[in-house]
Amino acid sequence: MTGLSRKVPSHADAVPTNDPMSDSTAPQRITTRTLQRMARDGQRISMLTAYDYPTAQVLDESGIDVLLVGDSLAMVVQGHETTLPVTMDQMIYHAEMVGRAARRAMVVVDLPFPEGQLSIENSLQCGARVLKETECHAVKLEGGAEQSERIGALVTAGIPVMAHVGLRPQNVLVDGGYRVQKDTDRLVKDALAAESAGAFCVLIECVSREIGKAITDAVSVPTIGIGAGPDTNGQVLVTNDLIGLTSGYLPKFVRQMADVRGTIRKAVTDYRDAIDDGSFPGKKETF
Ligand SMILES: Nc1nc(=O)c2c([nH]1)NC[C@@H]1CN(c3ccc(C(=O)N[C@@H](CCC(=O)O)C(=O)O)cc3)CN21
Ligand SMILES: CC(C)C(=O)C(=O)O
Ligand SMILES: [Mg+2]
């Protein structure tokens, strides 16, 4: 432990305001500046994926700082083998639900394959759709140095960008699988290029602890790791992995903190058994 502490904020921390147009019970929204201040003050940033309204609501109420409408929804919600099939329209549909639910958290939306690889103008259109059609606040884009120009154009247009370096799941077919990334020089260069281009934060996936620290030391924007060790400014996981809703293989970096599949299975089999033996509906559930 490093003695760093993490205040768990809640909706009770709402900042009162005299503005009659603003909801005085609303908690103060996490922004790009909040994240930068947290990183500077040594306060760790928590981030999780969210794909729907009720889940986003409970994550937001629990004090998670950043919600990610990840393109992992292709795998954990849609049941695809990779993140490649999910479309921009589908991302928008889920981003609408998550944006509607989040009151305190900043909400970031992945640009799905291949929207972050086509023309810069196309990426601007996608980023603008996220800001105009959903109540979300930023986009995330896989890539580093080679994405500098695109990141710059998005930020200039008023669209905040989180860069995603290290393992890039949208490259899985080229790479032939998900591998820990080892090229320190290239990874540090990617993060520095993303920062210079205007990214407000760098997400680092699947690298050694040493590389996670080297990147965090090299850049002045916050870093958020997934499988990047404990020295990044924040951590992110796929919520379904965290709560035990994912079936099958879990990456080494996951800590499964609950067994929601088991909880649902028990509720559902209890329900089935209660129908079976005639005990449901009982007196209390009958008019
Ligand atoms: N459910 C889920 N969780 C995730 O974290 C996740 C997704 N889906 N989909 C998109 C990407 C893909 N991710 C992955 C998937 C697998 C590994 C993996 O198998 N890693 C190996 C390392 C192999 C090596 O040693 O190079 C491991 O052992 O964890 C890593 C990241 C992270 N993302
Ligand atoms: C794994 C995280 C970082 C992500 O990009 C996603 O959920 O799509
Ligand atoms: Mg993603």
Image (cartoon, rainbow, N blue to C red):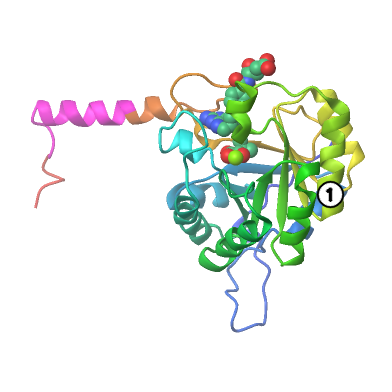
Please, is residue 159 above or below residue 56 in the view? below
**Percent coordinates x, y for residue 9 in the rendering:** 67, 52
Look at the image and say whether residue 279 sits in the magenta stretch.
Answer: yes
Residue 239 locus on image (x, y percent): 54, 37
Compared across the picture, whether 274 is left or right of 152 comes to left
List the residue tagged with mark 1.
195
Task: Judge by depth and name the residue closer to the eye, 52 or 86.
Answer: 86
Location of the N terminus (image quadrant): top right
In the rendered structure, the answer to whether residue 252 lies left or right of residue 197 reads: left
Q: Give the range drawn in magenta.
A: 265-281
Q: Is the magenta stretch mostly helix, strand or loop?
A: helix
Q: Can residue 1 be seen in this view?
A: no
Vertical relation: 82 (above or below) 65: above
- Quadrant location of residue 264? top left
Ligand 2 positioned in quadrant: top right
The x and y percentages for residue 126 are 58, 58
285 or 78: which is nearer to us? 78
- The picture places residue 176, in percent across and down from the top left corner, at 60, 21
Q: Is mark 1 on a helix, strand or loop?
A: helix
Q: Is residue 99 visible?
A: yes
Q: Residue at x 10, y 26 (%)?
A: 277
Looking at the rendering, which quadrant does residue 13 occupy?
bottom right
